[in-house]
Image: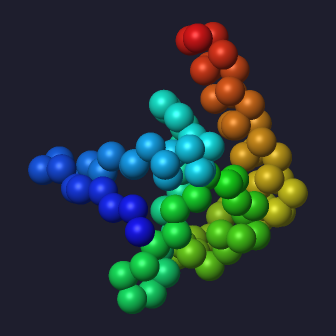
Amino acid sequence: MITGTISSKGQVTIPKKIREFLGVGKSDKIAFIPLEEGKVIITSKPLRATELFGMLKHRRLAKPVSVDEIEEAIKKQRNKRAEKRARNC
Protein backbone atom coordinates (compact mmCIF):
# COMPACT_ATOMS: atom_id res chain seq x y z
CA MET A 1 0.00 0.00 0.00
CA ILE A 2 1.24 3.49 -0.89
CA THR A 3 -0.17 6.43 1.06
CA GLY A 4 -0.33 10.22 0.76
CA THR A 5 -1.22 13.03 3.15
CA ILE A 6 -3.96 15.64 2.78
CA SER A 7 -2.70 19.22 3.19
CA SER A 8 -4.54 21.97 5.06
CA LYS A 9 -5.89 23.11 1.66
CA GLY A 10 -7.31 19.63 0.94
CA GLN A 11 -4.62 18.82 -1.62
CA VAL A 12 -2.89 15.45 -1.91
CA THR A 13 0.49 14.84 -3.48
CA ILE A 14 0.28 11.69 -5.57
CA PRO A 15 3.34 9.55 -4.80
CA LYS A 16 5.88 9.17 -7.62
CA LYS A 17 5.30 5.42 -8.02
CA ILE A 18 1.57 6.01 -8.51
CA ARG A 19 2.15 8.86 -11.01
CA GLU A 20 4.50 6.59 -12.96
CA PHE A 21 1.99 3.72 -12.80
CA LEU A 22 -0.78 5.99 -14.14
CA GLY A 23 1.56 7.53 -16.71
CA VAL A 24 0.68 11.08 -15.66
CA GLY A 25 2.72 14.21 -15.17
CA LYS A 26 2.37 17.93 -14.58
CA SER A 27 -1.00 19.38 -15.73
CA ASP A 28 -2.40 15.95 -16.68
CA LYS A 29 -5.94 15.18 -15.60
CA ILE A 30 -6.98 12.22 -13.50
CA ALA A 31 -10.47 11.02 -12.65
CA PHE A 32 -11.84 10.18 -9.21
CA ILE A 33 -14.73 7.73 -9.39
CA PRO A 34 -16.55 7.32 -6.05
CA LEU A 35 -17.68 3.84 -5.10
CA GLU A 36 -19.46 2.75 -1.95
CA GLU A 37 -18.06 2.44 1.57
CA GLY A 38 -15.47 5.22 1.27
CA LYS A 39 -13.64 3.72 -1.73
CA VAL A 40 -12.59 5.66 -4.82
CA ILE A 41 -11.06 4.62 -8.14
CA ILE A 42 -8.33 6.95 -9.42
CA THR A 43 -7.59 6.62 -13.11
CA SER A 44 -5.86 8.43 -15.94
CA LYS A 45 -7.73 6.39 -18.54
CA PRO A 46 -10.19 8.49 -20.54
CA LEU A 47 -13.68 7.16 -19.96
CA ARG A 48 -16.39 6.88 -22.58
CA ALA A 49 -19.59 8.80 -21.94
CA THR A 50 -21.51 5.52 -21.65
CA GLU A 51 -19.28 4.51 -18.73
CA LEU A 52 -20.30 7.67 -16.86
CA PHE A 53 -24.04 7.24 -17.43
CA GLY A 54 -26.02 7.45 -14.22
CA MET A 55 -23.25 9.06 -12.15
CA LEU A 56 -24.77 12.56 -12.39
CA LYS A 57 -28.29 13.78 -11.82
CA HIS A 58 -30.24 13.99 -15.06
CA ARG A 59 -31.52 17.28 -16.34
CA ARG A 60 -33.59 17.67 -19.45
CA LEU A 61 -31.91 19.29 -22.40
CA ALA A 62 -33.84 21.26 -24.98
CA LYS A 63 -32.63 18.81 -27.64
CA PRO A 64 -31.51 15.25 -26.84
CA VAL A 65 -27.82 14.55 -27.54
CA SER A 66 -26.62 11.19 -28.85
CA VAL A 67 -23.71 9.28 -27.32
CA ASP A 68 -21.80 9.78 -30.59
CA GLU A 69 -22.24 13.56 -30.31
CA ILE A 70 -21.01 13.47 -26.71
CA GLU A 71 -17.98 11.38 -27.70
CA GLU A 72 -17.16 13.83 -30.51
CA ALA A 73 -17.39 16.82 -28.15
CA ILE A 74 -15.05 15.07 -25.69
CA LYS A 75 -12.52 14.32 -28.46
CA LYS A 76 -12.58 17.95 -29.65
CA GLN A 77 -11.96 19.23 -26.12
CA ARG A 78 -9.07 16.78 -25.61
CA ASN A 79 -7.50 17.92 -28.90
CA LYS A 80 -7.82 21.58 -27.87
CA ARG A 81 -6.10 20.85 -24.56
CA ALA A 82 -3.32 18.89 -26.28
CA GLU A 83 -2.72 21.75 -28.74
CA LYS A 84 -2.63 24.25 -25.88
CA ARG A 85 -0.07 22.12 -23.98
CA ALA A 86 2.05 21.77 -27.13
CA ARG A 87 2.11 25.55 -27.60
CA ASN A 88 3.13 26.09 -23.96
CA CYS A 89 6.10 23.69 -24.13
Is 55 located above or below residue 44 in the figure? below
Quarter assignment of residue 75: top right
Q: How is the image coloured?
A: rainbow
Residue 54 percent coordinates (x, y): 62, 79
Q: Is residue 77 left or right of residue 66?
A: left
Q: Is residue 33 left or right of residue 49?
A: left
Q: Residue at x 22, y 56 (%)?
A: 6
Q: Is residue 63 visible?
A: no
Q: Residue at x 44, y 43 (%)?
A: 16
Is 42 located above or below residue 44 in the figure? below
Residue 78 percent coordinates (x, y): 70, 37
Name the outermost residue toward the right.
68
| The N terminus: image quadrant | bottom left
Is 87 located above or below residue 64 in the figure? above
Q: Is residue 79 left or right of residue 26?
A: right
Residue 88 percent coordinates (x, y): 56, 12
Q: Is residue 30 left or right of residue 68?
A: left
Q: Residue at x 58, y 58 (%)?
A: 43
Quarter assignment of residue 65: bottom right
Q: Is residue 54 visible?
A: yes
Is 68 located above or below residue 11 in the figure? below
| The C terminus: image quadrant | top right
Q: Residue at x 24, y 56 (%)?
A: 5
Name the outermost residue toward the bottom.
37
User: Toward the viewer: 14 or 48?
Assistant: 14
Residue 69 percent coordinates (x, y): 83, 53
The number of numbered badges drawn on the structure is 0
